[in-house]
Structures are given as C-alpha cells and as structure tokens.
Image (cartoon, rainbow, N blue to C red):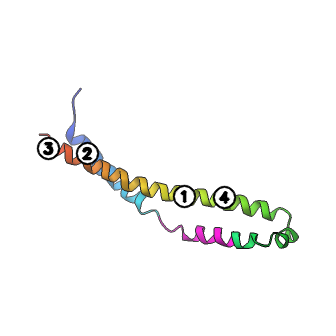
C-alpha cells in the first residue's frame, strides 16, 4: 500500500473548506422564532381548538420537528468545528512526511 501524502493533503484541504461551509450554517433564526410563536399559540389550546380541532396536534408536531431540525443544525456546526480540528491535526502530521 502506498501512502499518497499529496493526495491526502489536497483532499484534506478541500474537506476543510466543506467543513467551514457547514460551520457557517445560519439563517435559522426565523425557524426558532416560528417555534416560539407556535409555543405561545399553544398556551391557549381551547382557542386553537375553536379555530380547528387539528391545530393543537399539528402545532405540537411542527414544533417537535423544528426543534429536531434546529438541534441537528447545531450538531452539524459542532461536528464541522471538531472535524476541522481533526483534519488540521492530520495535515500537521503529514507535513513531517517527505
């Protein structure tokens, strides 16, 4: 097996660029605000039921899914930061190989 240092270094640099893009995931504040507004609206469940009996469970399901989405985005950002550090460490190790 041949260790192709230059190829690994090149792919690592490209991977770091991909990870930097993941770290910059943003613009999700409107989703968080929507989730909060749905929570406020759910405080008066009777009023929601008066509009439509389907609204309370629909709002609850939507809030749950938005929460999952926001949590996943935050997790991706964290992984982006951590994997960038890992790959930078790999590049540092490879820089010593001639």
Furthest toward the top, the residue is: 1
- Label 1 and label 4: CA atoms lie apart by 11 Å
Q: Which residues are magenta?
A: 26-38
Q: Earlier in the sequence, mark 2 or mark 4?
A: 4
Dot 4 surroundings within 10 Å: few (below 14), some, or many (20 or more)? few
Name the residue that disc number 1 marks. 71
- Label 2 and label 4: CA atoms lie apart by 38 Å
Name the residue that disc number 3 marks. 96
**Rendered location of residue 42, percent (x, y):** 75, 69
Q: Earlier in the sequence, mark 2 or mark 1?
A: 1
Secondary structure found at label 2: helix
Secondary structure found at label 1: helix
> Of the numbered discs in the image, which one, if any, rests on residue 90?
2
Whether residues under marks 1 and 3 lie with C-beta atoms below 8 angstroms apart, the answer is no
Q: Earlier in the sequence, mark 3 or mark 2?
A: 2
Q: As rendered, which of 67 and 30 lies closer to the eye?
A: 67
- Is residue 91 rendered to the left or right of residue 30? left
The residue at the point 30 percent across, 48 percent down is 87
Secondary structure found at label 4: helix
- Label 2 and label 1: CA atoms lie apart by 28 Å
Secondary structure found at label 3: loop
- Label 1 and label 3: CA atoms lie apart by 39 Å
Name the residue that disc number 4 marks. 64
Q: Tell me if residue 60 comes above or below residue 9 in the rendering.
A: below
> Of the numbered discs in the image, which one, if any, rests on residue 8?
none
Q: Per the image, is 57 magenta?
A: no
């Amino acid at each position: 097996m041949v260790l192709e240092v230059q190829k690994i270094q090149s792919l690592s640099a490209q991977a770091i660029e991909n990870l930097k893009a993941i770290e910059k995931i943003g613009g999700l504040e409107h989703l968080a605000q929507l989730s909060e507004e749905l929570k406020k609206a759910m405080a008066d469940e009777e009023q929601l039921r008066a509009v439509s009996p389907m609204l309370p469970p629909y709002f609850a399901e939507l809030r749950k899914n938005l929460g999952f989405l926001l949590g996943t985005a935050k997790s991706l950002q964290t992984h982006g930061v951590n994997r960038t550090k890992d790959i930078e460490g790999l590049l540092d190790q490879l820089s010593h190989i001639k």
